[in-house]
Amino acid sequence: MVLVKRFKKLFSLTSEYFFSKSICQFFCLVLFCTQAIQAVSAQSQNFNFINYGVKDGLSHGIIDAFCRDKEGFLWIGTYNGLDRFDGTTFKVFHSDYHNPNTLMDNYVHDVCEDHDGNIWCGCEKGVSCYNKSTGKFKNYKLNNPNGFVVNANQVYNILCDRKGTVWCASDAGIFEFDKQRNNFKGYYHSDKDSTSPSSDRVYKNSFIEDPKQDGIWLSGPQGINYLDIKTRKFYSFRNNPQQFPVFFNAKIYPMAFDVQQNLWFATPGKQFLYCYNFSSKTLSSNKIETGKAGNEQLYHLATLFFDSKNNTWFSTWDLKLFYKEKSSAFFKQVNHDNANFNSISSSFVWDIIEDHDGTIWFGSLNGISKLQSSAQNFSLLKPNGSLPANQRFNFINALYQANDTSLWIGTNTGLYAYNLQTGQSKKFNNSLTGKLNYINYIVPFNNTLWLVCTNDVTVFNPGNKKAPTSRDSDPFGSRVSTLRGQYFLRRRSLVS
């Protein structure tokens, strides 16, 4: 019942103009189904998704937001906390009202990382900041001068701009984090000030940084606004001295930039996607075509995304997901299929992000779906390339991928860490015993790496980045032996 009320509340804030009570109730009913609705369209789809759900350790099936941090972890905002995914396992952070150092609220609507590596969460009751060094959350409440405090703390959008400032937007204001004062400063609509926001309400998936200029684009019930970060002034249909066609008074969401850095957006109940070209300063309307005769329909978009190939993805409030290749004129529907294990987990998605390697992640009502690029077959990695000549190795004997960016390499000269994003390698020396040499096998165990070497077993803790501790077999009361290529530590629970 709480979840039903939550979605009714959310829809009333963002979609009240087209969602009848019956549709809202139907949508909420879908959330309680053990599987997403199987689409009735017979249109074929050629995507093979890898799906992750509650059974895999995810805290909740409803995914609100993604953030990929500098270390390669995927942070996930859900309806039951903040999750961190290392490519194998999920770590869940929950709210505990008895502990002020925990997450503000378990409804996490958006996530971002600041320049210091802290993880910021836009929650239902305010903003939370997770400090990785301390393992603690710092929570912030937002204000509104007109008394709409509850609405002000319903934070659906949060981002860190290229200068390092954290911004968030809620149902009652746009807020900037003041690092020196350790609080948020609000910007609010004023009828007397045309340079203020045209509305205090900013819709979800409608708060994005400009890819070139120091500014933020946002939209809500009274059109698109542009926040000039240098002057802290808002441009909109109320403040449009150069008469740019992108500013007009209408309900607008969502928004996204394509590869050419054109701004795309939608208005509810239309058959068009709108594109603003910054070079020509022109606004064009692009009809959503499916190629099916008599299939004219109105679209109520919730999510809009352009991948690195400039293909278009969008999800609608009536639980449909569409995809269009850059070279195609028609959108295809991407359906969940109960009979197909590799279909997308749900035909409605809240957020979509893409990794540097072309992998696309979809956050849905039924978990996470991962789509790997069809062109992603083999890549040549050169871990020796960034190393000085005296640190290079000749043979690779063992590999262990800790997450999407960290690859551990066992070689004839020791242990190396390779960053899959930057292409940089680092060699770890054993300053304690000097025995770390020819590594035959890497075994992860209890947050450590057990390195099976030629003459001993070495235990290395990647978390504290300390030098590995090399020990012979006798102090462990164990013997290292091989059997058909596998390594065993007798009388211990570690088995590869």
Image (cartoon, rainbow, N blue to C red):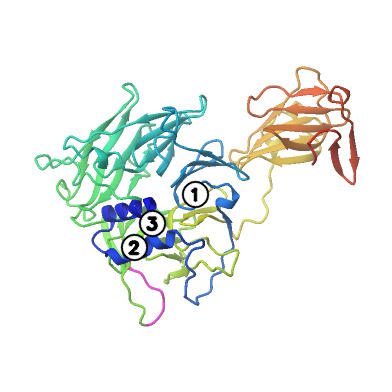
Q: Report the Cα–Cα distance between label 2 and label 3.
A: 21 Å
Residue 303's label in the rendered image is: 3
Residue 25's label in the rendered image is: 2
Residue drawn at point x = 61 percent, y = 45 percent: 87
Q: Position of residue 171 (x, y in %)?
A: 26, 45
Residue farthest toward the bottom in the current orientation of the protein: 293
Q: Residues within 10 Å of mark 2 (few under 14, many from 20)?
A: some
Magenta segment: 287-293
Q: Residues within 10 Å of mark 1 (few under 14, many from 20)?
A: many
Q: Label 3 sits on what residue type?
A: Thr
Viewer-closest of 66 and 277 = 66
Viewer-closest of 121 and 165 = 121
Q: Is residue 464 left or right of residue 41?
A: right
Q: Position of residue 168 (x, y in %)?
A: 33, 39
| Residue behind mark 1 | 60
- Assign a secondary structure to mark 2: helix
- Assign a secondary structure to mark 3: strand
Toward which corner of the image does residue 170 lie, by quadrant? top left
Residue drawn at point x = 90 percent, y = 46 percent: 484
Q: Residues within 10 Å of mark 3 (few under 14, many from 20)?
A: many
- Assign a secondary structure to mark 1: loop
Residue 255 appearing in the image: no
In the rendered structure, does residue 290 fall within the stretch colored magenta? yes
Circle 2 or circle 3, nearest the eye: 2
